[in-house]
Amino acid sequence: MSANTAHRMRLRFRDILAGDVCIHPGSVHDAISARIAGSLGFELAMFAGSVASLAVLGAPDIVVLTLTEFAEQARRICRAAPLPVLVDADHGYGNALNVMRTVQELETAGIAALTIEDTDLPTPFATPKPTLLSIEEGAGKIAAALAARDDPALAIVARTSAVAISGMDDAIARARAYAALGPDALFFTGITETSQLQALAAATTLPIILGSAPPALGDKAKLAASRVRISLQGHQPFAASVQAIHATLKALRDGTAPSAIGGVAPAALMREVTGGADYEAWTRRFLGG
């Protein structure tokens, strides 16, 4: 992806934040899934750290993925995606200085926006439950992220799980402290009630992004009224692909004839998601085919 294209995608993401509606992003994990999300009309792609760990390492979401591995997969996705890509950069892969490196690598990869969270990651020794960094350290990471970006259109999003971990009072305090630094949006996880969302929305004036919300918070119009501009729906596409691959391989291993396997993408869809028409045109133009 060229710098100009990446910049245009970042402006498209900022249009979402500046709008007055709430959207659901398409959860993606590779180039093909990003192309599919774009072809179906999603306004935004979401590449999560949990999905990255699954797709790249086949490992659970316990932060064993490295920044290099995450950035490389993000680059592949951005290269193919016809839409902006928001990524979950977890804890920034270390302290505030590591966060600066994270922003630089992901900006180079072509992303439109990234989140940095204040969870204490990777999980410290003898810590059975998730814990948070101090507000001061969390704020330092957000300040470092803002200082590290080169393209001012790149959106930096401050993320906290305080609602579920330390309670509403701490969540509001963190929202205010992070908002004062000038990020482009706030990302909250663990919200289960409308009253919690309303209290957090009242604490700042920034656009809000929500992690997977319960059915009680599924009305996009009501979410939009509380300045929620993006609400995640989870990462079912990757889980569905695992199920489909498992079922297909099992059927073949059990002796099912390849011609009898169901659920296989037809040739027309494969041609669409691989950009077949473009490659055919380039072949004629540059190879005389």
Image: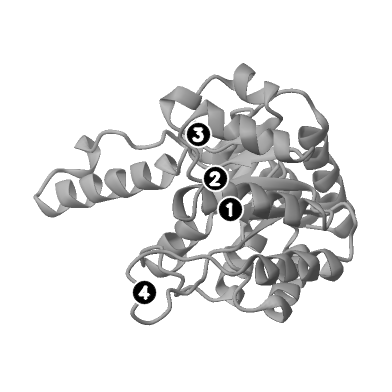
User: Which residue type does callout 2 highlight?
Assistant: Met
Asked whether disc 2 touches disc 1, contact meaning CB atoms under 8 Å apart, the reply is yes
Sequence order check, earlier mark of 2 and 4: 4
Q: Read off the residue under disc 4.
A: 127
Which residue is at a point 86% across and 45% down the rendered structure image?
A: 8
How far is the residue under mark 4 from the one under mark 3?
47 Å
How far is the residue under mark 2 from the one under mark 4?
22 Å
Sequence order check, earlier mark of 3 and 2: 2
Q: Is 227 situated left or right of 163 in this image?
A: right
Q: Read off the residue under disc 2.
A: 168
Which residue is at a point 61% across and 69% down the rendered structure image?
A: 134
For the N terminus, the quadrant is bottom right
Label 1's element? helix
User: Which residue type does callout 1 highlight?
Assistant: Asp
Percent x, y for residue 47?
57, 52
Q: Which residue appears farthest toward the left when viewing the image? A: 254
How far is the residue under mark 4 from the one under mark 1?
20 Å
Asked whether disc 2 touches disc 4, contact meaning CB atoms under 8 Å apart, the reply is no
Label 3's element? helix
Label 2's element? helix
Which of discs 3 and 2 lies nearer the camera? The answer is: 2
Q: Read off the residue under disc 3.
A: 269
Which residue is at a point 57% across and 68% down the rendered structure image?
A: 70
One can see residue 289 in this view: no
Percent x, y for residue 137?
67, 72
User: Which residue type does callout 4 highlight?
Assistant: Thr
Q: Read off the residue under disc 1.
A: 170
Label 4's element? loop
How far is the residue under mark 3 from the one under mark 2?
47 Å
